[in-house]
Amino acid sequence: MAACNTRHKTFFPLRATGLVLLAWGVNSVHADAYPSKPVTIVVAQAPGGGNDAVARVLAARLSTVYGQQFIVENRPGAGGNIGSAFVARAPKDGYTIFMTSSSHTINPSLYKRVPYEPVKDFAPIAMVANVTFVLVANPNFSAKTTGQLIERAKQQPGKINYASAGNGTLNHLLAEMLKSATRVEMMHVPYKGSAAALTDVIAGQVPVGFNSLTAALPFIKSGQLRALGVSSQQRSALAPDIPPVADTVQGFDATAWYGCRFSG
């Protein structure tokens, strides 16, 4: 799930149920004057992904509630490290909010160095959403189920490509989890963002990949993508007809978080 963080002692609590985001208050030394100017919500991923979509819903709601502009600014790159570093260096005045995802806490384990302290440099505001991912395939790809994909991958080691939003992203790690659990080999094709990866699976440039269910669902419903399985152990209420990957790969279970933080 992604996290929303803001910089400073301004505490800006938010609660979210699904995509219905309700601001319930601001607690600050200058609470009566906040916000007195536009607030930037930094997203460490490219436009079009799940994190970006949640941030834009959040920004629209907060702009209405507080009568001040909340502006989404995308700063993608280095698996989210560029956006994290930018917010860590931002003024600690409550006017830079970080809308981030699981990558914020995953990256310190993937990179020898990250340009921020994931705990010390940020003050948590709220957990905003949990997002299920889905394994999707181009409709012309021969595999129609997770089991068939695994079978094809075993028959053609290293010959099947999968798309991700970039090295170290959850899309990438989910596919690596699948490979590890089933002992198959597939080739990783990293993109600059989940929207670009999804576009190429739809176009048939790459046959399969994991993506957020919220981003992929319209294309699944239109027939432009085939859903093989959701990443959660339970079926999603958004798409109850899609079986979990765990039905085929025992113990497979992962969801993303989205949250908010101040730089702190």
Image (cartoon, helix red, strand yellow):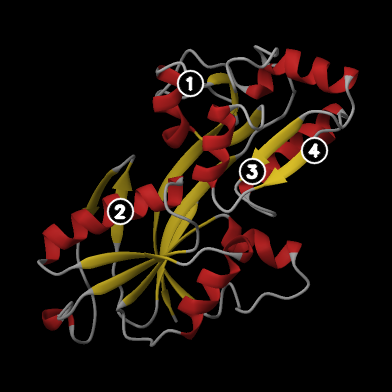
x and y percentages locating residue 135 in the rendered image: 61, 28
The quarter holding residue 38 reads: bottom left
- Residue type at mark 3 is Ser
Distance from the alpha carbon under mark 2 to that under mark 4: 33 Å
Q: Which mark is residue 56?
A: 2
Q: Residue 187 carries which label?
A: 4
First in sequence, mark 2 or 1: give its number. 2
* Residue position marked by numbered label 1 in the rendering: 224
Q: Please tell me whether residue 63 is drawn above or below residue 222 in the rendered image.
A: below
Q: Which quadrant would the C terminus be assigned to in this image?
A: bottom left
Q: Which residue is drawn at 48% across and 21% down?
A: 224
x and y percentages locating residue 200 in the rendered image: 57, 35
Q: Is 64 left, or right, of 102 in this rendering?
A: left
- Residue type at mark 1 is Gln
Q: How crowded is mark 3: few (under 14 residues within 10 Å), some or many (20 or more)?
A: many
Q: Is 214 left, or right, of 254 in this rendering?
A: left
Q: Which mark is residue 82?
A: none
- Judged from the image, the secondary structure of the residue bearing numbered disc 2 is helix
Q: Residues within 10 Å of mark 4 (few under 14, many from 20)?
A: some
* Residue position marked by numbered label 3 in the rendering: 164
Q: Kindly report which numbered mark, 2 or 3, lies closer to the viewer in this rendering.
A: 3
First in sequence, mark 2 or 4: give its number. 2
Distance from the alpha carbon under mark 2 to that under mark 3: 22 Å
Q: Kindly report which numbered mark, 2 or 1, lies closer to the viewer in this rendering.
A: 1
